[in-house]
Image (spheres, helix red, strand yellow):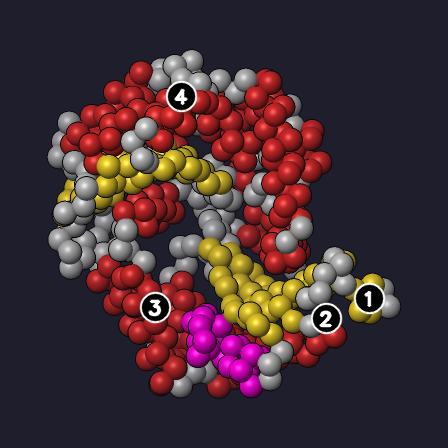
Amino acid sequence: MSQHLPLVRAGQPGAELTAGQDGATIRRTVLPGGVRVLTEQMPGLRSATVGAWVGVGSRDETDGHHGSTHFLEHLLFKGTPRRSALDIAEAFDAVGGEANAATGKEHTCYYARVLDDDLPMAVDVIADMVTSARLDADELETERGVILEEIAMTEDDPGEVVHERFAEAVLGTHPLGRPIGGTPETIRAVPRDAVWEHYRWHYRPETLVVSAAGGVDHDRLVEQVGEALAAGGWDLDPDRVPRARRTGDPQADGVPAQGSELTVHRPVEQANVVIGSTGLSATDDRRFVLTVLSAVLGGGMSSRLFQEIREKRGLAYATYSFAQGHGGLGLFGMYAGCAPARVDEVTALMVAELEQLADGGITTAELERSVGQLSGGLVLGLEDSGSRMSRLGKSELVHGELMTVAESLERVRAVTAEDVRELAADLAARPRTTVRVGPFTDEGVQ
């Protein structure tokens, strides 16, 4: 069974478990107001990475507020009553640290990596940004231009375009189908008042998770977080509990019942194509089976897509499969970049490989190789404090439990060839969507 980190109120010792062969210790405390603090103390590390995870993403935007989540990622670095934008930048530069942020479809994270002695500073600055952003009107207008340029940069990358259009086509009017960064229309239209409302509604104690990994002392961090949030004016009501995690039935949320085809014209040399369907939610019990399936199908140089499309036929430089899990639903797809004249041939080959998995399953050698690939990747992926900080934050926001590395490996190794075949059959039978981006016209290739 997985190691659940039980609810622990402030003033009580955090829940502890030894996670991994390196003797790292994970602890979790819930502060008044519903703020969750998780740490992974890694012996021998002189650095630490800390992140403030706010449980709000682009899927949470309502009409009139679209684009606000990404706007806030930019604007929180633009100053508070205590610090200017330059003060925030200099605080980290002065100690050789790094600070950044990322917006997702279901969460936003503000994070920093610093020496362990500088962790109190990082906590204070990030907490100040999260609790006390000014959202100055002039700064907002400046960032409006910056974000529009960011969107334009994305639109100039056909690889980015094909994945965004694929999500839109598969998920339809579901909020997860919207681009994370917004569209030029929504960014131009959203007023400062709407961004402010979005900030005040979602940036609250019950939505916040603070995670840290590396040279970190849990009790000291809990104290620092509590003091910093109180200094920011947050009401840390002892009766408030963390906001409930996401649930939802995708069938009732605007996901199309039929597949579709979409062609996007771009004057480029190479066509980019994605074909796929809905996938599994982030909490689906079959997610470990999906990781094995994707590894065999398109997860590396020995995968079926790579061997068939690139090695045997020389039709593409890059080809792979991918899966994205969210609350209530997910995406599954296969990608290739190829000559525009060969896009139909490549698409047919990708479909054929998925259907062969559905009909015949995988071999024992493929199963063993994928399990080894995933096991090594899991362990190697946790070699730095940043990846462990992210693992803590995402586990708390999405699952409400944290598996040890050993248990994660056990779940991967428990996958059978029949499990993979059954899931492949499920995915192959779902309504299929194809998106092509390239030099196409109504008459064909330009």
Element under disc 3? helix
Between label 4 and label 1, give the one nearer the viewer.
4
Q: Which of 68 and 79 is in front in this view?
A: 79
Which of the labelled discs sits on residue 374, or is there none? 3
Q: What residue is at 44 percent from the left and 18 percent from the top?
A: 84
Badge 4 amino acid: Asp
Viewed as shown, does residue 441 lie left or right of 126?
A: right
Give residue 299's position: percent from left, percent from top: 45, 70
Between label 2 and label 4, give the one nearer the viewer.
4
Viewed as shown, does residue 379 lie left or right of 186?
A: left
Which of the labelled discs sits on residue 293, or is there none? none
Element under disc 1? loop
Give residue 342's position: percent from left, percent from top: 70, 76
- First-in-chain label (1 vs 2): 2
Q: Mark 1 points at which residue?
A: 446
Element under disc 4? helix
Task: Give the Cα distance between marks 4 and 1.
Answer: 52 Å
| Classed neighbour count for the residue bearing mark 2: other residues with Cα under 10 Å, few (<14), some (14–19), many (≥20) | many
Residue 150 in sight in this render: yes
Viewed as shown, does residue 54 lie left or right of 164?
A: left
| Classed neighbour count for the residue bearing mark 1: other residues with Cα under 10 Å, few (<14), some (14–19), many (≥20) | some
> Which segment did they paint magenta?
294-312
Q: Which residue lies furthest to the right in this view?
A: 443
Which of the labelled discs sits on residue 340, or is there none? 2
Task: Give the Cα distance between marks 2 and 4.
Answer: 50 Å
Task: Give the Cα distance between marks 3 and 4.
Answer: 42 Å
Q: What residue is at 35 percent from the left and 85 percent from the top?
A: 364
Task: Give the Cα distance between marks 3 and 1.
Answer: 41 Å
Which of the labelled discs sits on residue 87, or is there none? 4
Between label 3 and label 1, give the one nearer the viewer.
1
Element under disc 2? helix
The reply to whether callout 1 and callout 2 are in contact (CB within 8 Å) is yes
